[in-house]
Amino acid sequence: MRQVALVGFVALASAIASYYLTNEFGWFGAANAAVALVALVVAAASGARQLGRIGGAASHRVVGRGLLIILGSVVMAVGMERAAAYSKLQFDWTFERAFELAPATVKALRELPGEATATLYREAGDPRIRRTRLLLERMAEEGNLRLRERSLAEHPEDAGRFEVGSSNTVVIVLGDRFETVGRPTEGSLYEALYRLQSAEGGQVTVLRGEGEGDLSRTDDGGYAGLSAALATEGYDLRSVVSASMDEVPVTTDVLLVVGARRPLRAQSLAAIRRYLDAGGSLVALLEPGAESGMEALLAEWGIESPEGVVIDPARDSSWASVAGLDPVAYHYWDHPIAQGLNRNRMTFFSGARSFRLRRPRPEDEVSKVVETTRFAWIETDPTALEQRSGHFERDDHPADFQPLVVCGRYPRNGRETRIVAFGDADFASNQNLRSLYNLDLLINAVHWAAENEPMITLRPKNRPTPVQFPIPLTNTLQTLYGVGLLVPELLLIVSGALWLRRRSG
Amino acid sequence: MTELRALVRKEFACLFGSPTAYLTLTMIALVTALIFFDHLRIYNQILFLYSTTTMGGFDTGAIPDHINLWDRVFFPVMETLGLTLIGTIPLITMRVFAEEHARGTDELLISTHLTPSLVVLGKFLVTFLFVALVMIVSFLYPATAIEQGGLGVEHLAAVFVGLTLHGFAIAAIGLACSAYTSSQLIAAVSGWAVAFTLWDFSWANAFVSERTARFLEAIALHPRYGSFAEGIVDLDNIFYFVGIALVAMAIARFAFDLRRVGS
Amino acid sequence: MNAQGQPGSDAGTAAGVGIEARDLTRRFGPHVALDRLSLQVPPNETFGLMGANGAGKTTFIRLVTGYLLPSEGSVTVGGFSPAANPREVKARLGYVMETSRLYPELRVQGFLRFMAGARGLSGGAVSASVDRVIEQFQLADVAKRLIGNLSKGFEQRVSLAQAFLHDPPLVIVDEPTGGLDPVQRGDVRAVLHELQGDRTVLLCTHDMDEARALTSNVAILNDGRLVAHGTTHDVLDRGDPLALFRPHGETAA
């Protein structure tokens, strides 16, 4: 029986080995599989027959107990594994916590109106599939998301239907709509889910014409990223030339002014005033050194922005040309706009102006949202922004927390006017929008201004680019010699010495 | 407990009293280091090839995302190591029970206060500790080299945990096979065959229903091991490997019962 | 205690323990290795169990130690059943196997310390017992040597020594002089003679001279059956004892 079992095991291993080597079950694999099946069944039957021949109550008890122990261990093993799977307890030890879903992703998954299907298209040997699969599995745990995998080669019809161009593409289908994600990360999958659920955020009217940020530009200084982000959140963007604007469009839910650098025309400012008086919402991004008229308008609403630029030496980014000019802020006030933000979720400002707040009317609420450390001050030297490098002394400027983002709520004519002001327009540029938690702060500000508080959340961060630098050969060789080869060498010496010692008794 | 302690000490003395343990450690460490170095060398060559032909350098997005240290070096090595362990660990486990049975010293053990359960527990424990040592030794070089490349310590720890648990599972399978024979050859071959079969059932997908395929995937080693390589430590995967060890221990213990009643 | 672990007829006393087998049967497939063997090994004496190769001696011993379970019948050691009360049986039992089955990669002292621990001894008791048997069996010169490098004679002494670590009231010795030269055989017999004392020794042998020298009573197995049982002198010195060893030879004592 043992020889038969040996033949069976060898044939089984050979059959599987042939599959792994050739990726198919050829005649060799099939023949070995058949031999294995026959041999192992014969060996098992022979063993069972021998077992049936055992005699004596004591023997039966012992065998029965042994089999019960095996059964019990299987039950325990399966039970433990299932209980653990049910608990969904998981530790993400990746460097960037790649598999901990952002609150926004979890929210989007839990709010799926029906069952969505995510199909991962793959080609054999694609190393990215494993990671994407893990990510999708993680997402499926949070919402009504069914997972499938399909081979691109076996489903060529899907390539045209869903515009699937390459392996590691995910197609999410919800009802009769679908979204194709060519480079699946948590962020891109989240955006796809969001688009599928077609949340109606409202209309955002964006002013242009006076040096405001261009939402169509895709270079570092452009604001195309902001445009895409707002669209993802369900907002319909409409661009208006301020010079020709007599009235803010009535369909506007939020008026967005992104860093106007030239003075707005009086009639434009008047239109904005009327809009706000009637209970409109405004999100304004200012720039230090610019006087567009928005500053004076905001001052009418209790949001004054003194001249100068904020310098925060305690918390500046490492790439600031002037020390403290690009503060990284982590002081947040308790406000829906800053929901979820804390010391570990910072926001980045690149040359910002600060604010002073007052209440125009007793019933108005004007508050800070984000501020610097207490070591910051407002530098009024106009050369601060133009210097390439250097260091500014505080001198007589008082050091204090400097608000960088503020907001206000104003009951007006039976409605509520909402204003959010950012002291830095570059905050939302393509270069900076995806830095740290800038995107979340800005989009949440728009949601708050549009009175879409339920949509306020923290969005998934895109995975950093994987390491694509070569490890220098010298380093590699040194490590190989020092660890990779030295350890086996020492082990060989030890084993040789031991063998010689054994021989001598 | 006294008996178990005595057995564990004896097993360690037997294991490390022979050059075989050191030779096994040496072989696995060397193979791992060479495989890793080879992958690293090829990865560097690919990078240079891309950077020179596209004239983009390393930092300009000219290189596809999937050409990176993780996907081109670390994970393929871990995959290879997973299979290498299937090939090498049964060589460690083949003698554990089979040699005792061939020598007849199992009868001597059972004549003492050592029960079959204690014998199985003691031998499994020592083998697992040896496998952990094998993992430490073979993981040193890849971990050091990759740490230079920026993969975090926690992620490396996750991979190490996965590798070690995977090693434990293969060792458990090998030990269970060793318990049923006095021939080390049969023990090794059957250990290979069972572990290899359990590694991945994707070959069966074409022949079975989707439900069966999902079940087979749930009991296969490879998918469970793979998530550790990604830095994810799932409790259910940990219990999967623990479960394999438990069941293998019960099966190994049953060999003693069969011998007692054997016809 | 009987085979069910309840108080019953006891074949043991405070100093030595006895063995009692009733209709003990063991089959290996169609082959009957022991066929309804009923035998009593009295306590406090050296009892010889004899028979040709394959007569069933080792099978009987394995049933006594609990390594095998009977197909039918029962066996008790000092009133305890090896199946129901294995720990009680093993605490009273020392076993020297047919061929020295030791661990060649261990040193003599290390092996003895392991066996002492495996028999439940701990702490100072381990050292005391190991030192005692090393002296008793004159193993001092080889205590630090690897077992694999010992001569056959010393190996057998080590095998004997491990059986006496816990000073058991019953010692089973299976073919202790097999493969030894005459001088070594004499040494082993001398050791066995010294250690008889007030304990029970079950000596399995097919050497009649050895049985005559060491045992007071013998039983002869042939083809799994008891074919002779009585004093050594009565069984081996009268008639044709060799016939008892031949297949199908039966003589009532």
Image (spheres, rainbow, N blue to C red):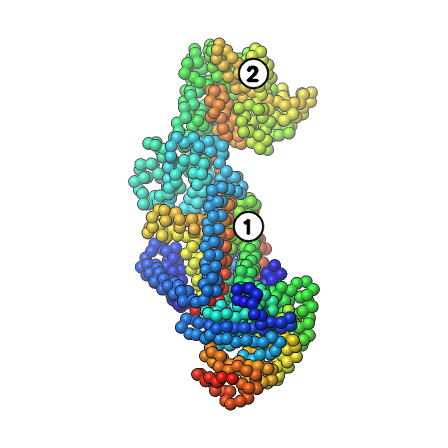
- Residue most extreme to the left: A157
Q: Is residue C132 above or below residue C222?
A: above
Q: Is residue C172 left or right of residue B61?
A: right
Front residue of this view, candidates A64 and C147: A64
Q: Is residue C56 left or right of residue A317?
A: left
Which residue sits at x=46%, y=18%? A255
Picture coordinates of residue A42, whole percent (x, y): 36, 64
- According to the image, label 1 marks what residue? B143
Q: Which mark is residue C233?
A: none
Q: Is residue B151 above or below residue C133?
A: above
Q: Are marks 1 and 2 in contact (CB under 8 Å)?
A: no
Picture coordinates of residue A348, whole percent (x, y): 56, 28
Distance from label 1 to label 2 (Cα)? 56 Å
Which residue sits at x=65%, y=77%? C197
Q: In the image, what residue type sits under mark 2?
A: Glu
Front residue of this view, candidates C8 and B202: C8
- According to the image, label 2 marks what residue? A365
Picture coordinates of residue B228, whole percent (x, y): 50, 47
